[in-house]
Each structure stands twice: as structure tokens, then as C-alpha cells.
Image (tube, helix red, strand yellow):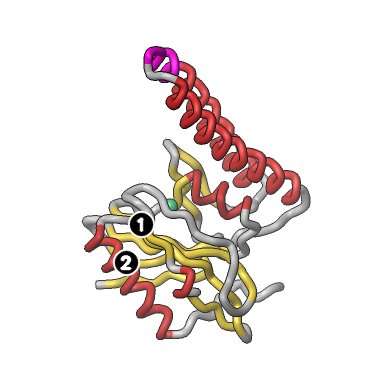
Amino acid sequence: MTDRRINISDFYIDVMRDMLSMSLREEREIGAPLCKVDDQIIIDLSNLSIGNEFNVNIPDRCSRGEYVGSIHTHIGSSDFSVKDIVSAIRRGSDVECLCYATEEEAGCKCIRIEKPRNYNELQTKARIFHDALIELDDAYRKLVDIGREFEEEYYQVFSRLAEILRRTEEAIADKAIERGVIRGRRENGIVEVSDESIVLRVEFE
Ligand SMILES: [Zn+2]
């Protein structure tokens, strides 16, 4: 049986705590790549990214060591979002960590992303999905540039496309759960992971 634990030093547990307090103070999600250096997982602070209230884009590269995943913060929700899971698959993460603060609790949890047979197919779909998102964003900006007189039509077309994207994203997440990439269940845009997927849990006061 493979060793499921992950090795993170106390220093980086403190970094997690700092990232979470910074995130709460700024009311923005914060994230960074996780990199493997000599069997230890480190948080690559030179690639620290600051997002907005709902999202953060984390580069999938390391300034040292090998990229193994990412860590990011949530304010108000202690669960991974569907987007988090789909994006982890796209980037080929092995580990994903989430640090969260809700009214009841604050802490971090890291999950192992399994790579079963057919993982590549799922990863291809996640990449196509991501490219489609970027293209849609680009198209939207171009259309807005063309003129504002059809604004209502834009709105309708884009809300329909956004709905299709949301359903596609959920379908990818469902397949990931079904195939055992992560263990858990999806509901209303969030993925509640089961203890079987969690490889590190930290609680803060
Ligand atoms: Zn998230």
C-alpha cells in the first residue's frame, strides 16, 4: 500500500495560517503552488497569487522543486468548489490544499487527487473546458467592443453559454467522483470530500 500521508514542515503550517489571516484581512482568496523538494512539500511563496473574493489563479510551476498541486484560501466555505476540482485535474495536481475560515471553524485540509485509468481523458476534457472559458471571455470582450446597442441580446446569449459551461464543469466533477479521482459528493457547486481523500488536516484556533 502506498503511503498516503504528506510531509509538510511546521514552518509551512505557519505559512498556511498566515495566508489565511491575510486572506481574511484583504477579503480575497490567496493561493500558491505546492512543490516537492527532497520529499517535503513546500509552499512556493515566490509564486503567491492574490485573487478576488471568489477566485484565485495559481501558476502551475515551481521556482524550485517539482510541481505537485496548489493551496488556496476560502472565506466562508470549508469545502472545495467544483471549479477547484476541475482546475486541479486540468493542472494534473497530486495534492490540493484548502485553508478556510467560517464562523464555526478555521483550518486547512489537503486531499490526494488520484489518477486512475481514464484520468488522461478527464484531464483532456478539463483542459478543453478551461480553453473554452478563456475563449468565451475573449469573445465577450470583443462583442462589447462592437457596440452596446445589443446589450440585452449579449446578455441572453452569454447567460445561456454560462449555463452550458456550468453544467459541463459539473459533469466533469461528477465523472471525477465516479471514477475515484476524489472521494466525496457534489452539491450546488461545492464538493464535500470524504475522509478517505483527506491526507492532512490542520485546525486553527
Ligand atoms: Zn476554491
Residue at which label 1 appears: 29
Q: What element carries label 2?
A: helix
Density class for disc 2 (Cα within 10 Å; few <14, some 14-19, many ≥20) is many
- Residue 111 seen in this snapshot: no
Judge whether 159 appears above or below 126 on screen. Answer: above
Where is residue 161? Give x, y as percent. 52, 24
Residue 154 magenta:
yes
Judge whether 52 appears above or below 169 on screen. Answer: below
Q: Quadrant of residue 130?
A: top right
Where is residue 163? Give x, y as percent. 49, 26
Decide if residue 23 is on the left or right side of residue 86: left
Residue in view at x 38 percent, y 55 percent: 51
Single out the residue that lies furthest toward the front. Answer: 146
Residue in view at x 37 percent, y 77 percent: 15
| Residues rendered magenta in the picture | 149-156
Residue 177 magenta:
no
Where is residue 70? Give x, y as percent. 52, 64
Single out the residue that lies furthest toward the right. Answer: 117
Q: Which of marks 2 and 1 is in front?
A: 1
Q: Which mark is residue 8?
A: none
Q: Which mark is residue 20?
A: 2
- Residue 149 seen in this snapshot: yes
Which amino acid type is marked by label 1? Glu
Decide if residue 149 is on the left or right side of residue 131: left
Is 184 in front, or is 51? Answer: 51
Is 139 in front, or is 196? Answer: 139
Judge whether 134 appears above or below 45 on screen. Answer: above
Which amino acid type is marked by label 2? Leu
Residue in view at x 45 percent, y 47 percent: 81
Where is residue 43? Give x, y as percent. 48, 74
